[in-house]
Amino acid sequence: MYTNHIVVIGAGASGLMAAISAAGRLRETNSSTDVILLEHKERAGRKILQTGNGRCNLTNTYINPKCYQNDNTDFVMNILREFTPDNTIEFFNEIGVLTRIRSMSSKDGNSAAGYVYPHSDQASTVADSLIREAQRLGVVIIYEADVAGISAAGASGAAGLWEVSYNLNDELRSITASKVIIAAGSKASPKSGSDGSGYRLAKLLGHRIIRPLPALVQLESSCRLCKNIAGVRQDAAIRLESDSRVIAKARGEIQFTDYGCSGIPVFQVSRHAVRALSEGREVTACIDLLPDMTTEQISGFIRASAAHNSQSTLLDVIAGMLNMKLAKALLDSLGIKYRFAACNCNERDINVISHQIKAFRMQLTGYKSFENAQICIGGVSLEDVNGLTLESKLAHGIYFCGEILDVDGICGGYNLQWAWSSGHLAGIMAAQDQLRTERRNH
Ligand SMILES: Cc1cc2nc3c(=O)[nH]c(=O)nc-3n(C[C@H](O)[C@H](O)[C@H](O)COP(=O)(O)OP(=O)(O)OC[C@H]3O[C@@H](n4cnc5c(N)ncnc54)[C@H](O)[C@@H]3O)c2cc1C
């Protein structure tokens, strides 16, 4: 039915943005090309609805290369410069989404961070507005269309057209397209639709896939104290050590759970733990439970507190600084009895306790699965993609955007910003290329 069109695979954040940008550019020139968006779920933007605990942290006003952790941050930053967080805010305002900026305290180690949310505090505002904008620009969205393959159209593929085949209502159909934008996401949170099938499509066309692994994910530990401290939340600093090296660190509210630990700082360091563990390396989480105090200050506080009231037990004193469950677990881990009067505590024990507070160690044994992960590390190798256009270097007319690419950001709106920026660029570049072809053919 459709020939010679731009087909976008996946109506998530990046696919919707790519379709809108392509359709907008084509419209400026009265082009006859249609933009067709194929989505295998029954609605678009399902993952957007999950973001930011349902509030959608859609970008961040503070951005620098450290916000992206993959090997080629130049690639990422060049694309973000083409469509910046300011452009994102402008774009959303233009399509009717009022935004607001929430400044975060310096506790997260990122004092300039300005987390941007829709003013409605509802992720559905973002998803619905994108769908309406795509419809306004005439994008044809076909739901429940599960893309199964992409191949060169015609025997030789000489015309530079692609055959995109998809299953709809148990029937295999196809569209001939001059440009195909693959925006099928990763394997993270597969129930939202990103089930990893995009990797298979990319691989069919010869692209290398860097092994996808879950990231921004909870970490598991064999620490026998986990069950005792489950439910405790503590402002702390986490440092990951592997092969006697610090491989990542972050600060913020850590949540201790019966299986290990969670919370934003844990998510921030998770990609490093996941990679090391998946390579069979040992990883220890070293948690500083009082990051604003030195070991000496902690020892001084214990001494002063013990001297102040001779009736106070050692547990009373430590629980004066830390959550009670944590205080008990910490003393248990050291094998120190804590029911006796703290004033009888010897210097050696005070020292050991202070050091343990500064470096509470949990041996990491694993990480939660793709179902729990917010994003993936790995994906289509950036080496196979042109960093100026997001077109494949291997297959002319095939573009990539969003999380399917080997790009991962930290928490704070950076992954959606990548989806918007890369989706915008892929859409514009595919449309411009299409317009050039149209001009040549006339
Ligand atoms: C719980 C959670 C919270 C998050 N919170 C935030 C946040 O607050 N801020 C932030 O920046 N990031 C957040 N993220 C990450 C962010 O949502 C993603 O990075 C982003 O949505 C990726 O966009 P995408 O378009 O690349 O992929 P997706 O949004 O996953 O879209 C891919 C689309 O392709 C479709 N698809 C896949 N395969 C096929 C196929 N074969 N045929 C047809 N359609 C197909 C899928 O159904 C899906 O609709 C969060 C993620 C999760 C899971």
Image: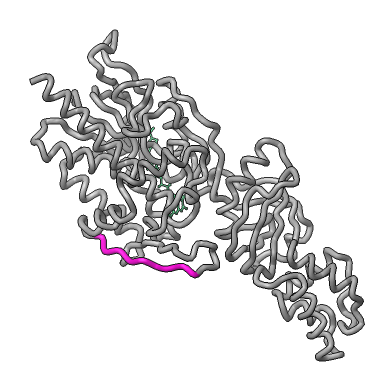
Query: Quick one: 33 or 197, which is closer to the camera?
Result: 33
Tell me: 230 left or right of 252.
Answer: right
Does residue 66 appear to the left or right of 89 in the view shown?
right
Q: Residue at x 56, y 53 (%)?
A: 268
Quadrant hosting residue 349 = bottom right
| Relative side of 299 to 323, left or right | right
Residue 79 lies in quadrant? top left
Residue 162 sits above or below residue 216 on the image: above
**Residue at x 52%, y 38% (from the top left corner):** 71
The stretch of residues the image draws in magenta is 97-105
Nearer the observer, 173 or 361? 361
Q: Please check the rendered image and state whether residue 412 is part of the magenta-colored stretch, yes or no.
A: no
- Which residue does the image show at 21% across and 35% down from the upper left? 35
Does the rendering let one see residue 293? yes
403 in relation to 85, above or below: above
Does residue 167 appear anywhere in the picture? no
Across and down, in percent, residue 77 comes to 40, 44
Q: Nearer the viewer, residue 11 or 75?
A: 75
Where's the N terminus, which quadrant?
top left
Q: How many marks?
A: 0
**Residue 361, percent across and down?**
75, 57
The answer to whether 345 is drawn above or below residue 424 in the figure is: below
Q: Residue at x 19, y 45 (%)?
A: 135
Image quarter for ligand 1: top left
Residue 147 against residue 122 in the figure, above or below: above
- In depth, the one of 112 and 209 nearer the eye is 112
Colour style of the rendered protein structure: one colour
Residue at the extreme top of the image, as rendered: 155
Residue 271 horizontal/vertical position (percent): 58, 46
